[in-house]
């Protein structure tokens, strides 16, 4: 019997004193270190537009007091055990000022997901038959019901469709119905955030999200033939993509602009320009211009490509889902999902997880219900610590707010939780991978490279970083830096200096 995913529930029986023991102690502002202040000044950002915290992680649960000096991993315990006090922050600047964290808000969503659902939580995509099967033909409809899987990509869609055929359904004498009703969502305007609806990060969440609602084009130069081959994925019924584009000589430059692409017709992609051979192979992902027809077109094309036949259409279910269970597809575990969310700052995956907080366990999720659930969870986990203002849980928002102290408290508690390893390993390594890789280009000799795991955030007027840093003296720190100012982008080096200062143990 397949195990049932746990319904999220708020932790019970937690002592408030224990919660506050993990929170950042109250402390007056400490001056910003000189190199951080100088980097802010060079960027034209006043210190009043910045919030920063660097705090040692508290001793692990059950640790006893040791004196003198900070707790050390190999130290001997005193004869009389005493509760471990939270260590004082080394730096706390405007720690209680609400700030827009941009994608750093994903830390709240992913830790809440781990704490409420567990690292092994999985999503199910269920398939039902409406009718009877005889000699490989389903006389009736096939129903595919989503549960909000954040990463239902091509390989797993194909595996699901082949599993249907392995169960004896190779021809559908009826329709393929798609059910995404697990989420109750308002209409999504992909242009609302920044008037750039074709950017993949502007794709909206969906109860049956296939391949992030994206169309990915690959350009493969063939210099001998003076042409450039074009490949696209996923296959989409009724969408024509030219098999090649003319080649161009000269430097690569802004190759996307030179292609003069037109994505406005949902039935056709066209290019009026040329592709420079010097660019080599490149990929271009765009949000499909007609998102409501993305999943039906993909399922139609992939079903037929897998050898399936269909007499009717692929369309969205209009009504209540009913039928006989046929097969079930399973998502990657939540620990793997949050690694993608935090390492690559995937907005729609974060929103899928945020909605799942209120949808998990045979319920219907919505942004409002997830916001309410997260607020209750936050109060139980962090007591009186300022509750974050959450919009969609991804940070792709002008209204989300959190304090540096609240982020530090979350990072401290996550490090002491049973989910510590999954949470920490989801964060990119500074200067090495994911969105934190750029540190190496900005500061090639930085002490932070390889010595911190960080979630970064960037919006217009926002630059942010939060995560863990390993000090050269052996201590581990939580690091939070939030900048809200029109020149925030130019102040990114100040956040680099913050992480370096933590790695140098505040020297």
Image: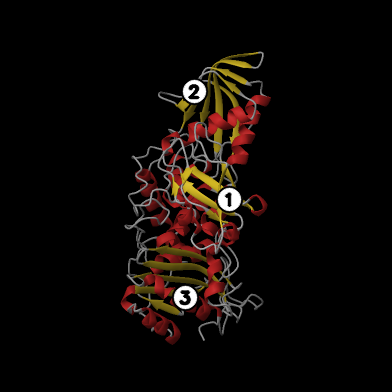
Numbered label tally: 3
Decide: few, some or many residues near mark 1? Use Cα within 10 Å; few <14, some 14-19, many ≥20: many
Between residue 252 and residue 148, name the one nearer to us: 252
Between residue 479 and residue 185, name the one nearer to us: 185
Which label number is shown at residue 313? 2
Q: CA distance from mark 2 to mark 3?
A: 57 Å
Q: Determine the image quadrant of residue 486.
A: bottom left
Decide: few, some or many residues near mark 2? Use Cα within 10 Å; few <14, some 14-19, many ≥20: some
Indicate which label's residue lies in the foreground, 1 or 2. Answer: 1
Q: Which residue is mark 1?
A: 219
Question: What is the basis of the colouring in this image?
Answer: secondary structure
CB under 8 Å between discs 3 and 1 = no
Q: Earlier in the sequence, mark 1 or mark 2?
A: 1
Give the left or right position of residue 145, taking residue 102 as reference: right
Which label number is shown at residue 54? 3
Q: Earlier in the sequence, mark 3 or mark 1?
A: 3
Residue 151 appears in view: yes
CB under 8 Å between discs 1 and 2 = no
Q: Position of residue 35 (x, y in %)?
A: 45, 85
Q: SS of the residue at dot 1? A: strand
- Tell me which residue sits at (62%, 35%) in the image: 158
Q: Position of residue 207 (x, y in %)?
A: 46, 37
Q: Position of residue 443 (x, y in %)?
A: 54, 77
Q: CA distance from mark 1 to mark 2?
A: 32 Å
Q: SS of the residue at dot 2? A: loop
- Tell me which residue sits at (37%, 39%) in the image: 185
CB under 8 Å between discs 2 and 3 = no
Decide: few, some or many residues near mark 3? Use Cα within 10 Å; few <14, some 14-19, many ≥20: many
Q: SS of the residue at dot 3? A: strand
Between residue 119 and residue 324, name the one nearer to us: 324
């Amino acid at each position: 019997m397949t195990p049932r995913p746990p319904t999220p529930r708020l932790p019970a029986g937690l002592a408030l004193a224990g919660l506050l023991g993990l929170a950042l102690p109250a402390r007056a502002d400490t001056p910003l270190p000189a190199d951080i202040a100088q980097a802010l000044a060079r960027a034209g950002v006043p210190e009043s537009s910045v919030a920063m915290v660097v705090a040692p992680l508290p001793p692990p649960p059950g640790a006893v007091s040791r004196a003198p000096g900070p707790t050390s991993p190999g130290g001997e315990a005193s004869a009389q055990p005493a509760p471990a006090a939270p260590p004082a922050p080394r730096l706390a600047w405007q720690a209680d000022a609400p700030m827009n964290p941009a994608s750093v808000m994903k830390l709240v969503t992913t830790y809440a997901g781990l704490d409420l659902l567990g690292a092994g939580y999985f999503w199910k995509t269920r398939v039902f038959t409406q009718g009877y099967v005889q000699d490989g033909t389903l006389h009736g409809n096939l129903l595919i019901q989503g549960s909000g899987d954040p990463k239902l990509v091509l390989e797993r869609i194909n595996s699901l469709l082949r599993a249907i055929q392995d169960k004896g359904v190779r021809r559908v004498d009826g329709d393929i119905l798609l059910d995404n009703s697990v989420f109750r969502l308002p209409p999504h305007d992909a242009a609302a955030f920044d008037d750039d609806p074709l950017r993949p990060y502007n794709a909206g969440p969906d109860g049956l999200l296939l391949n992030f609602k994206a169309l990915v084009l690959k350009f493969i130069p063939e210099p001998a033939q003076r042409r450039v081959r074009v490949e696209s994925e996923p296959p989409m019924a009724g969408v024509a993509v030219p098999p090649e584009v003319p080649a161009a000589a000269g430097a690569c430059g802004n190759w996307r602009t030179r292609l003069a692409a037109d994505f406005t017709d949902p039935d056709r992609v066209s290019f009026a320009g040329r592709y420079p051979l010097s660019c080599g192979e490149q990929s271009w992902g765009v949000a499909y211009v007609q998102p409501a027809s993305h999943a039906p077109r993909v399922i139609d094309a992939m079903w037929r490509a897998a050898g399936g036949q269909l007499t009717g259409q692929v369309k969205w279910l209009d009504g209540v889902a009913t039928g006989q269970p046929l097969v079930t597809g399973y998502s990657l575990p939540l620990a793997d999902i949050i690694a993608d969310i935090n390492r690559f700052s995937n907005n729609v995956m974060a929103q899928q997880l945020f909605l799942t907080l209120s949808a998990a366990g045979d319920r219907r999720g919505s942004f409002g219900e997830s916001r309410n659930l997260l607020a209750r969870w936050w109060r139980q986990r962090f007591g009186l610590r300022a509750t974050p203002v959450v919009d969609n849980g991804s940070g792709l928002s002008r209204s989300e707010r959190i304090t540096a102290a609240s982020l530090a408290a979350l990072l401290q508690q996550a490090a002491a939780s049973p989910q510590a390893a999954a949470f920490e390993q989801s964060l990119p390594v500074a200067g090495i991978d994911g969105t934190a890789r750029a540190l190496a280009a900005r500061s090639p000799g930085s002490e932070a490279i390889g010595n911190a795991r960080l979630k970064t955030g960037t919006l217009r007027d926002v630059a942010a970083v939060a995560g863990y840093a390993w000090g050269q003296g052996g201590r581990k720190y939580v690091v939070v830096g939030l900048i809200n100012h029109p020149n925030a982008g130019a102040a990114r080096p100040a956040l680099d200096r913050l992480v370096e200062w933590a790695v140098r143990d505040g020297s």
